[in-house]
Image (cartoon, rainbow, N blue to C red):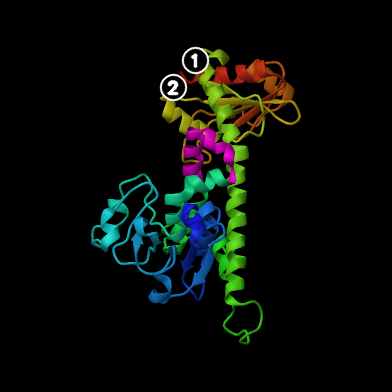
Amino acid sequence: FFSLLLPRATRIMTSIGTHSGAFQADEALGVWLLRRLPQYKSASLTRSRDPDVLKPLTIVIDVAGLYDHDQLRYDHHQRGFFETFDGENKAARDGGRPDVTGPDSATGVFKTKLSASGLVYKHYGREILCALHPTLRSSPDALEWVYTKMYRDFMEGLDANDNGIEIADQVRYKDGTSLPMRVARLNSRWNEPAGSGPTETERFEQASALCGSEFGAALEYIVECELPARSLVEEALQARHSVHPCGEVLCLSSGGCPWKTHLYELERSLGVEPLVKFVLYPDTAGMWRVQAVTVEGTAFTNRLGLLEPWRGVRDAELAAKCGIPGAKFVHASGFIGGHETNEGALQMALKTIESSR
């Protein structure tokens, strides 16, 4: 009688299933992610390709040829499957039509086909993030941003790799240091004597722990570094007209803050017009930097570079050329300059903006 009062997960031992044999990063990470959830924290793990062995298990990933969230089955190998992170393709669940399921028919922003870990993250990601960083529970907007950011920066590459999607149409070199490559090297080698070294299950657990460590480190950086930076950039963007009425100069109180990606995203979401041209911030030596904002999607094309006559000039010669005492330098490409004071750095930005009118 008393056992009936217990939660179902307590009364019946939960179990996680995935395929046996050579393992990859997607199911190794998928298992680690599931184990962050209370309902699977103590779940047993079964690795098999036998349908009869897999059928009674609580949740199965990367095997069995079925994707059905209601049945807790998350495979991505079946014909016609094409589910993406932020889109839904119902045809993928029942085999679909391969001629109409693919990136062009994906309904969301993301076009990369999910792997097993991608499916786990799509359905359980928010819960997993909150389990690892409980403070996210109190901020739905921050949680949603981290959820998407983590997929874009970490998960999507694993999905693409497992589904055989190249990072570019033409690649110049092969990266042998990626997480999938490091996981692959944990598999037993073809020429190892039988029974030597760790068992297949032990090797899989090593791979799962490696994937979890990488996931945790990436998430920690996003939550503890990127998220506070985003708040700082948003505050500065909202206050840009107090720096100068033109609204094209941003001032950050802390140097080293990663601001570019946040600025692009926030400009879009807030409908900022005109776009910010320069960002001011202090460096570790106390000098004020004036840095040009690059065109989104480029590394070296500035929205507006510092004036050409100033480029490659330093100290007294630069101060004479720009008419701003205390000017320290301007890079030869015009993407960044320095001044002794915040006010001087602002003047360098404003003179450049005014000259572009």
Q: Is residue 348 above or below residue 8?
A: above
Residue 27 in the image: state x and y as whole percent: 49, 64
Q: Which residues are magenta?
A: 132-150
Q: Is residue 117 visible?
A: yes
Q: In this view of the protein, which residue sits in the foreground, 40 or 178?
A: 40
Q: Which residue is mark 1?
A: 246
Horizontal side, residue 238 vs residue 221: left or right: left
Q: Quadrant of residue 77?
A: bottom left
- What kind of residue is marked 1? Cys
Residue 357 in the image: state x and y as whole percent: 45, 18
Q: Is residue 72 above or below residue 202?
A: above
Horizontal side, residue 67 vs residue 204: left or right: left
Dot 2 surroundings within 10 Å: few (below 14), some, or many (20 or more)?
few
Q: Which residue is mark 2?
A: 274
Residue 84 in the image: state x and y as whole percent: 37, 52
Do the residues bearing badges 1 and 2 touch, measured as CB atoms within 8 Å?
yes
Q: Is residue 79 above or below residue 242?
A: below
Q: In this view of the protein, which residue sits in the foreground, 266 or 316?
A: 266
SS type, badge 1? loop
Q: In this view of the protein, which residue sits in the foreground, 312 or 169?
A: 169
Q: Residue at x 42, y 22 (%)?
A: 273
Residue 162 in the image: state x and y as whole percent: 45, 63
Q: Is residue 167 visible?
A: no
- What kind of residue is marked 2? Pro
Q: Residue at x 29, y 58 (%)?
A: 92
